[in-house]
Amino acid sequence: MLDGGARAQLATTRFGDVRWVPSIDSTNRHLLREARAGAAEGTVVVADHQGSGRGRLDRAWVAPAGSSLLVSVLLRPDLPVERLHLLTSIVALAAADACASEAGVEIGLKWPNDLVVGSRKVGGILAETQLEGSRARAVVVGLGLNVNWEGRLEGSELAGSAVALDDLAGHEVDRGRLLVALLTTLEDRYRALADRAGQLAQAAEYRRRCTSVGRAVRVELADETFAGTVADVDDEGHLLVDVGMCLRTVTAGDLVHLR
């Protein structure tokens, strides 16, 4: 899927080692195994099909072979644990940038890890961390992006909640070009995390592009559900929800945008 020109572009980034395979259990799971074996930062695994793809809360991610961009990247960041959420943020931003440049589609970012157009999901992100003491030894960030579904979402049970780039763009989208755009943009955004000013700039851009801010929402936690209006996303990546008498901080949970 990547020609010599594409690989030459990526050779100027840390993401030059791209391993594109026909089928795998899970790109995240595979790359976590590689990380434990000492794989270098910037290793990328892409698959046409995943047999055991996963999203948040261990939910299954199912897509027909060749229909999606299923990619995981290995990062070894020099970041404290409380700022590791920025890795999910910059992958989301880079994915949105790639969708705009290669498909002409503007993507919104729904907290905490979804890529959306209106109320329909285009993709999702899953970050998994290997800790060593209070620092991250490795972080694998996976992205699943609906690219060329050829109308197969229409009439399915996902029709009202999901959409693919080809439907939005009106034409097939080249997954190889999309991947190169994603990784070259990610290189710049990841480099920006080297200092606090860059970290704050990336967090601020995520907040500006987060479609959850200002929305009435229902927050679903493990032990309760409550409603409110999203006031902001703080520098730690936590959601601040106005529930009337106070702001509640949400560190993790499911978010439903209310009409």
Image: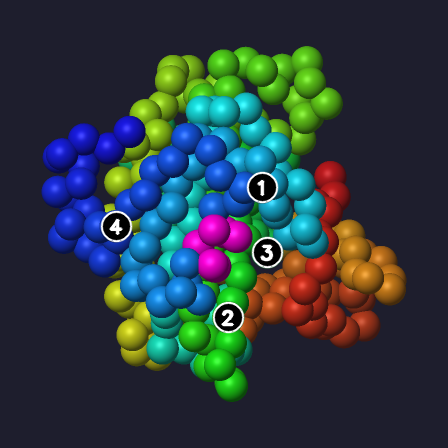
Residue furthest to the front in view is 37
Residue that badge 1 annotates = 53
**Amino acid marked by disc 3:** Pro
Kind of residue at badge 4: Asp
Q: Within the magenta stretch, is there residue 32?
A: yes
At a point 26% along the width and 66% down the height, the residue shown is 191
x then y, percent, for residue 220: 79, 56
SS for tag 1? loop
- At 47% from the left edge and 33% from the top edge, which residue is drawn? 23
Task: Choose the circle earlier in sequence order: 4 or 1.
Answer: 4
Element on which disc 2 rests: strand
Tell me which numbered mark, 4 or 3, is placed earlier along the sequence: 4
Q: Nearer the viewer, mark 3 or mark 1?
A: 1
Residue 20 position within the rendered picture, expressed as x and y whole percent measured from the top left: 34, 38
Q: Secondary structure at mark 3?
A: loop
Give the CA separation, mark 1 to mark 2. Answer: 19 Å
Q: Which residue is mark 2?
A: 130
Q: Residues within 10 Å of mark 3 (few under 14, many from 20)?
A: many
On-image quarter of the C terminus: top right
Q: Which residue is mark 4?
A: 17
Give the answer, above or below, for where 49 lies relative to 32.
Answer: above
Q: CA distance from mark 3 to mark 1?
A: 19 Å
6 lies left or right of 20: left
* Secondary-structure class at tag 4: loop
Q: Quadrant of residue 74?
A: bottom left
